[in-house]
Amino acid sequence: MSATGPARQMSPGTDLGFDGGLTLACQCADRKKAAEWYQRHLGFKLLYDVAEIGWCELATAVPGVNIGLSEVENPRVGSGPVPTFGVRDIASARAKLEKQGVRFDGGTQEIPGMVKLATFFDLDGNALMLFQDLQKA
């Protein structure tokens, strides 16, 4: 979830020149509807939309981390990484999303003294998660 302590040092053989940017690509049936969902429910900002290739990208609340939406005829969801976003108060964030009709997968899980986790889904069924770092409290 979040690193505690000093930044991790990469071994010399693995320094690939990462610049701090990260784009999480998700498949969707309709990128315009999906982009609107991410904007309305999560407050993400549309950066660009390229109709010719069926791709758009949105900035998240985390600097350097974007969500890319790839429009495909039959989206395959549920088999890739799950974007997990840190929040200060998971109960409050979850309540706001539920009030907007966002579907969650069960209750909020807690690993005492460590983290709280809540899984929810976008329009196409891609899983996303919220986490609250209990070590920061």
Image: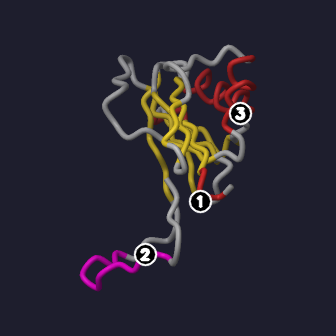
Q: Mark 2 = which residue? A: 8
Q: Classify 10 Å Cα crowding around label 1: few (below 14), some (14-19), many (20 and above).
A: few
Q: Residue at x 24, y 81 (%)?
A: 13
Q: Identify residue type, mark 1.
A: Gly
Looking at the image, do the residues carrying marks 1 and 3 touch, with CB atoms under 8 Å apart?
no
Task: Report x, y in % for residue 72.
Answer: 40, 24
Q: Identify residue type, mark 3.
A: Ala
Q: Classify 10 Å Cα crowding around label 3: few (below 14), some (14-19), many (20 and above).
A: some
Q: Identify residue type, mark 2.
A: Arg
How far apart marks 2 and 3 lie (CA) works out to: 29 Å
Q: Which mark is residue 93?
A: 3
Q: How is the image coloured?
A: secondary structure
Q: Earlier in the sequence, mark 1 or mark 3?
A: 1
In the current view of this chain or complex, which residue is farthest to the left? 13
- The region drawn magenta spans 7-16
Helix, strand or loop status at disc 3:
helix
Q: Earlier in the sequence, mark 1 or mark 2?
A: 2
Q: Residue at x 57, y 16 (%)?
A: 103
In the current view of this chain or complex, which residue is farthest to the front? 112
